[in-house]
Image: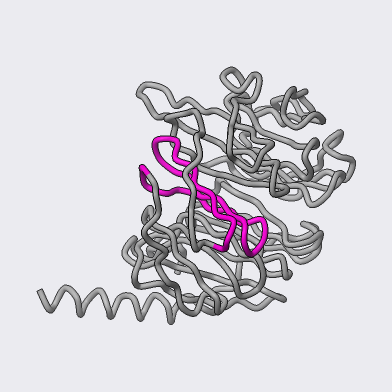
Amino acid sequence: MSDSTSGISFRSLAADRGGGLWLGGSVFGIEGLLLNSRGQMTKARTVSAVEFIQDLSFTNMRNGWMVADGLLYHTRDAGTSWQGVRPIARGGALKTVWFINRNVGWLAGSSGVVIRTTDGGVTWQKEDSGTEFTIEKIRFVSQDEGWAMGTDISPPETRRILLLTSDGGVTWRKAPGSDTQQFAGVIFVNSQLGWAINNKDEILRSVDGGESWKVQRPFDGTSWTSVFFVNESEGWAAGSGIIHTTDGGTTWKYQLRTSGSAEESLNEIMFAGRHTGAVIGLTRVLVTYDSGGTWRPLSDSWKSAVISRVRREKFKSASSK
């Protein structure tokens, strides 16, 4: 049974800094889905309190955070149980979460809301992002340097911005050229060196913390949505396939080609170290354990039990009405 017919979909991908990968999504759009892939073994859990897991951030193998249905949750037992974290001084639905260590983390979401904690989520402080765009992703390379990607959907166009901070999120500023480049994917490996994908499906590189960008891989007729580097040299990009570089993006080689259809499109790629990685589309997951030398579908061994249980719960709920 394929993911598209089973009602399983994916939206978030994270590493736990202990060699494991976490995937978040939904089953039938009514119950959160959480997968943990480690050492070619996959454990699956559903989170009945939520409908869709939007973003994940783990500081180690057991301590993690998730944004689901616009709210924040915390686990201390590797996702076995989750506790809602409320109240939070916020002004919109949450979209993204990132913790740089056990104590320091950030949340962001609609209406440009950015919130920071320095005590492991006990207290939170709202910061001024300077935008009303919805912040879809927030990430940091240290307690000071970070970036956020914002989106404004005002038909007939979608506008994107890239925000930068060098003081832990207290203040933010728009990256130069952000309005014209319309970045769709960004990754930094340190405070200065980063890569991005723009609205022309070009891969860009910055060596000055996002102040300026130069095209490394021009448009070649293919579409790219996500880029990820494990160090200054080795990285991958995903979209209409998967490409790989070992020289900092100067040259790229295909590891996987797709048809380019929406069903085969890949939305996000991430690695937990140099060898173990995953890439997600809306309804499928591919994994590698050899730096992308081979990519294969994630094992379905967990799927039938999860689908059957959620279907039973769905049926019981409908019957009781």
Q: Is residue 203 left or right of residue 261?
A: right
Q: How is the image coloured?
A: one colour
Q: Is residue 316 magenta?
A: no
Query: What residue appears at the point 77 percent right and 45 percent down from the top-left corner?
Result: 189
The foreground one among 184 and 61 is 61
| Quadrant location of the N terminus in the rendered image | bottom left
> What is the count of numbered marks?
0
Q: Position of residue 292 (x, y in %)?
A: 77, 57
Q: Is residue 127 above or below residue 17?
A: above
Question: Residue 290 appears at what percent x and percent y?
Answer: 81, 63
Q: In the picture, residue 250 is in which quadrant?
A: top right
In front here: 143 or 281? 143
- Classify 297 as above or below 205: below
* Residue 165, image quadrant: top right
**Picture quarter with the C terminus:** bottom left
Residue plotted at (28% across, 80% down): 312
- The residue segment tinted magenta is 91-120
Residue occupying the far right of the picture: 247
What is the residue that sits farthest to the left in this orientation? 321
Residue 117 on the magenta span: yes
Residue 231 percent location from the top left of the image: 83, 49
Q: Residue at x 45, y 36 (%)?
A: 112
Residue, x 71% and y 60% (percent of image)?
277
Give the x, y percent position of residue 271.
72, 57
